[in-house]
């Protein structure tokens, strides 16, 4: 993907920076007075402009309210009066709606949003008398899918020909690879363009638009209070994703998974990037098809990825080169794109988890700090036969433990057990499996992860046979499994310790910089 990013130009009486992608706060309220409260809040949050959604107002006196809103607004103001036929709430007659937008223009609005389907009628109404100060955004919304690059290019041309100062396209992401087409159209646009993809799979379009030259993105005042699906908060844009630091030369990293929204990885890496002055941004990547994703985002600007459930095993065959440990495990949790575009895969899970478990055992009265691993000779039960399960089974075996794999599907447990030289159980057998005391248990499944926090893979009674219990789940930090293990007197090790441990090597591979271990610990201590 080429990155000859066009400069973003704008001018406003209210003094916004030129050349930067702007953050616009979409505002919805019942009254004009409530809208003003939100305007001031938007300024405090760091927004560059506000979008007033006139169609959200329950009581609306157009001449009075429009003039009032313009006079009271502390930021540049965009008026949108979205009709139902374009996804809004207005269901009155079209002429009245367009007259209100005309009124807003005449009263001094900085921007007006008019739908492409209404642009001709609006232009006729204006008789070519648009105030020079006001920028006309002509918009098109597709709530079903994202068209082809060719169709998107044609759409941009049609919108441009309608008299738009700024082109706006909003589509819907059925797959994260849909966003690549929007990036392509954005980076090659010869006119100011707002190009965003709605839905969770479209989130990166809203975060990465400064890299590709987008005119603005939308950021909400509060989480969940959105005017379109998938909008991040202004606070997250600024403080989590370092939005003001993103530019054409920013490298893109991310956590690939499904689900993935729960991951704390962006918090960890973006804070570390900012602290080191490293030009990178780390994002959530909700990926359905890993190979399709890696092929669609093949530019070296997409420089590295962490892999989580369910993609760790398929990552092995998607990489051009895989290190020997990851090959032995059969799972990759870290992918680095080299300067030649080739993908290198490795596994940092087993080091992070096994080190945390060993430290937990050394901290108990089980063993002294002898040179050999405290896992040597221990019966080590792994729940799950996926990527993380394989990593822990491999790591425990390497340390001299006797490994048992328990999985919902017995055949998968048997397959992994045969590979590493261990025993297999179905998950249903685990409650009655207690051949000895002082065993070690490691859950590598998503059982007990938010939102299903009341679930546990094993009964509390059965936990009495274990000396140490580890859970790879770290949202919540203390799962039901760990809480009940602690109540039974077992030493517990949280997924946070594994998470930090596996991130050390990934950070170094991503950045080429020494890992700030204390910073990582400080960041995760607050979550």
Image (spheres, rainbow, N blue to C red):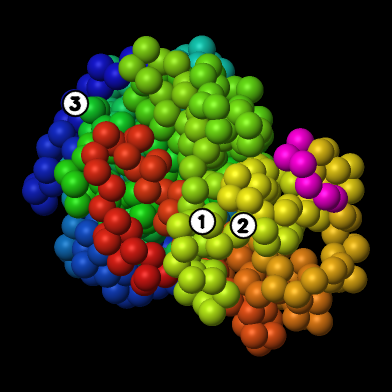
Q: Nearer the viewer, mark 3 or mark 2?
A: 2
SS for tag 3?
loop
Q: Position of residue 78 (x, y in %)?
A: 30, 49
Q: Which residue is mark 3?
A: 7
Label 3 close to label 2 by CB (< 8 Å): no
Q: Nearer the viewer, residue 253 or 107?
A: 253
Mark 1, Cα crowd under 10 Å, few <14 / some 14-19 / many 20+, is: few
Image coordinates for residue 65, horizontal then vertical, percent: 31, 66
The residue that mark 1 highlights is 372
Q: Nearer the viewer, mark 3 or mark 1?
A: 1
Q: Between marks 1 and 2, how big is the CA–CA gap?
A: 7 Å
* Residue displayed at 59% across by 22% down: 318
**Mark 3 → mark 2, Cα distance in angstroms:** 60 Å
Q: Is residue 500 above or below residue 417?
A: below
Look at the image and tell me whether residue 453 can be seen. Answer: no
Q: Which residues are magenta?
A: 419-424
Task: For residue 368, say whether it is visible.
Answer: yes
Numbered marks: total: 3
In terms of depth relative to the viewer, which is nearer, 403 or 255? 403
State the residue at coordinates (85%, 50%): 424
Q: Tell me what residue is drawn at x 29 percent, y 74 percent.
A: 37
Q: Is residue 72 left or right of residue 127?
A: left
Q: Is residue 423 magenta?
A: yes
Residue 520 lies in quadrant: bottom left
Identify the element where label 2 is drawn: loop
> Sequence-wise, which precedes: disc 3 or disc 2?
3
Name the residue that disc number 2 marks. Answer: 376
């Amino acid at each position: 993907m080429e990155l000859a990013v066009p400069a973003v130009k704008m001018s406003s009486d209210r003094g916004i920076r030129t050349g930067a992608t702007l953050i616009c706060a979409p505002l919805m309220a019942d009254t004009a007075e409530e809208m003003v409260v939100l305007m001031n809040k938007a300024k405090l949050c760091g927004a560059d402009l506000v979008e007033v959604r006139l169609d959200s107002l329950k009581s609306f006196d157009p001449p009075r309210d429009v003039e009032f809103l313009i006079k009271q607004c502390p930021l540049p103001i965009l008026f949108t009066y979205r009709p139902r036929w374009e996804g809004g709430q207005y269901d009155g007659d079209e002429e009245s709606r367009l007259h209100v937008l005309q009124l807003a223009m005449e009263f001094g609005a900085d921007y007006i949003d008019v739908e492409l389907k209404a642009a001709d009628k609006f232009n006729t109404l204006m008789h070519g008398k648009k105030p020079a100060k006001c920028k006309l955004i002509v918009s098109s919304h597709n709530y079903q899918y994202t068209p082809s690059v060719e169709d998107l290019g044609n759409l941009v041309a049609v919108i441009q020909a309608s008299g738009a100062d700024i082109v706006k396209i909003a589509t819907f992401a059925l797959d994260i690879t849909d966003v690549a087409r929007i990036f392509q159209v954005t980076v090659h646009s010869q006119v100011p363009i707002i190009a965003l993809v709605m839905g969770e799979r479209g989130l990166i379009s809203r975060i990465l638009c400064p890299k590709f030259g987008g005119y603005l993105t939308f950021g909400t005042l509060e989480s969940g209070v959105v005017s379109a699906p998938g909008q991040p908060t202004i606070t997250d844009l600024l403080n989590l994703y370092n939005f003001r630091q993103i530019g054409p030369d920013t490298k893109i990293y991310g956590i690939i998974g499904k689900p993935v929204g729960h991951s704390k990885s962006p918090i960890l890496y973006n804070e570390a990037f900012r602290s080191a002055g490293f030009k990178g941004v780390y994002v959530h990547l909700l990926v359905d098809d890993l190979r399709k994703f890696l092929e669609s985002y093949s530019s070296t600007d997409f420089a590295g990825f962490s892999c989580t459930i369910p993609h760790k095993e398929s990552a092995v065959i998607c990489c051009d080169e895989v290190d020997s440990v990851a090959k032995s495990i059969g799972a990759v949790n870290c992918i680095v794109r080299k300067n030649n575009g080739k993908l290198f895969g490795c596994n940092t899970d087993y080091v992070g988890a096994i080190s945390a478990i060993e430290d937990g055992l050394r901290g108990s009265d089980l063993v002294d700090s002898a040179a050999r691993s405290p896992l040597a000779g221990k019966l080590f039960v792994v729940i799950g036969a996926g990527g993380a399960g394989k990593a822990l089974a491999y790591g425990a075996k390497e340390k001299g433990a006797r490994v048992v794999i328990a999985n919902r599907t017995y055949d998968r447990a048997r397959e992994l057990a045969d590979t590493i030289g261990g025993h297999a159980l179905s998950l249903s057998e685990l409650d009655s499996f207690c051949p000895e005391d002082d065993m070690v248990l490691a859950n590598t499944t998503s059982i007990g992860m938010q939102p299903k926090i009341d679930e546990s893979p094993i009964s509390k009674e059965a936990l009495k046979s274990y000396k140490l219990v580890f859970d790879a789940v770290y949202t919540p930090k203390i799962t039901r499994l760990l809480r009940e293990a602690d109540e039974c007197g077992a030493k517990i090790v949280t997924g946070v310790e594994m998470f930090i441990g596996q991130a050390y090597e990934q950070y170094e591979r991503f950045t080429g910089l020494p890992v700030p271990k204390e910073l990582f610990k400080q960041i995760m201590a607050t979550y």
